[in-house]
Image (tube, grey):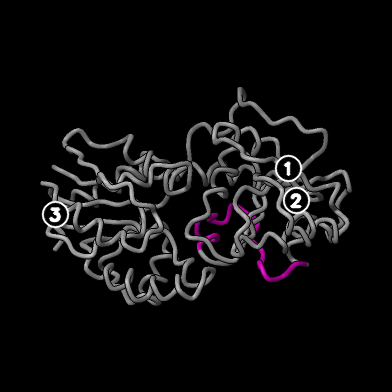
Amino acid sequence: MRVLIDSRWDADTGIGKLYREVMARMPGYVSPRFVQSRMGLGNLLTPLMLAREIGRHDADVFYSPSFMPPLYSRMPVVFTIHDLMHLFYYTKWHRLYYQQVIARLAANADQIITVSQFSKGQLVELLGIDERLITVVYNGVDDCYRTDTDSVTYQSDAPYFLYVGNRRKNKNLPAMLTAFARAAIPREFLFFLTGDSDGETAELAGQLGIGNRVRFLGHVAEEGLPALYRGAHATLFVSLMEGFGLPVIESMAAGTPVLTSTAGPLPEVAGGAALCVSPHDIDAIADGMERLVADSEGYQRLKEAGIKRSAKFTWADTAARTWEVITDKRRK
């Protein structure tokens, strides 16, 4: 089967990770072709460019690992919408483009893949997409994250909570920092963040009186993340909204308990194996941190439950289900 693939998403991002894992497990009967354009991923003309690329290629189906579909297509189209963050946390122009362009084009797709039941519900409710066009395929977690006796652990001079991710508004980082400052936990506990220091976050930490307890780790390559998770006392991921929430299952696989959110798909992904609190309630977030420090029995239960839960998410399953959707000729 000849599949035309939008390979521009091959990068060190969450979408790029999905793309690489799916491509690494391409079935032997698939003959790939790749979009040749180097147009930027955020270019508003991408749908037109993809339509032209489709016109130039002899393929049976088009596949993209992200949200930009072609303007028109003479072959079946399968693409992935991870979340609807653009409708809530970007500019009004992003919102209009998503509603007036992406939503209209998505309705013409043969199949849309999304990464959680929550995201599927949003696609139906907010974009009006027929639920029969949407297939949920969960993300996976690398085996390198899974805990074992030979695993390397990040060495720190003090216990730390860990946040892995960017600093966008939906990540709710100010609330987590405020809760950390408020939590009745030993002051030896530190707050580690991936990424470089930025003025806004550093200023807030200073205002909260925890500037000396917050550590910016800079860019952490993926091969360094498993040890970082394992060394943490717990991972903090109390977001306002996500499409999936990959750090939740990565941390679980590493044997590190997670404090996450009751919002969006995070309870769905956690499956009862993480401590979930309201992302809008700073006292609840602080209480969650206190419980993770003080309740040793509950901490151990979360650790064991997390390892078990994370085992249900593998990239092999993700790739197999994705290729099943791409190559399924029973679509309209």
Q: Position of residue 163 (x, y in %)?
A: 66, 49
Residue at 65% x, 42% y: name it: 256
Callout 2 touching callout 1 (CB < 8 Å): yes
Residue under label 2, please give it: 292
**Which disc, if any, is residue 55?**
3
Can you tell which quarter of the image residue 28 is in? top left
* Residue located 32% across and 72% down the image: 101
Three-letter amino acid code at the position of disc 2: Leu
Mark 2: give few (<14), some (14-19) or many (20+) Cα within 10 Å. many
**45 or 186: which is nearer to us?**
45
Which residue is disc 1 drawn over?
Answer: 233
Q: Quadrant of the C terminus?
A: bottom left
- SS category of the residue bearing label 2: helix
**In this rendering, is residue 244 above or below 133?**
above
Q: Nearer the viewer, mark 2 or mark 1?
A: 1
- What amino acid type should be assigned to the residue bearing mark 3? Gly
| Span colored in magenta | 265-282
Nearest to N terminus: mark 3 or mark 2: 3
Q: How many marks?
A: 3
Amino acid type of disc 1? Answer: His
88 or 289: which is nearer to us?
A: 88
- Of mark 2 and mark 1, the one earlier in the sequence is 1
- Report the Cα–Cα distance between label 2 and label 1: 8 Å
Q: Quadrant of residue 10?
A: top left
Looking at the picture, tell me which residue is in the foreground, 219 or 332: 219
Whole-percent x and y of residue 45?
31, 62
* Residue ID at (88%, 56%): 209
Secondary structure of the residue carrying numbered label 3: helix
Rendering coords of residue 290 (x, y %):
80, 55
- Quote the CA–CA distance across marks 3 and 1: 53 Å
Q: For the residue carrying disc 1, how many other residues have a C-alpha within 10 Å: few (<14), some (14-19), or many (20+)?
A: many
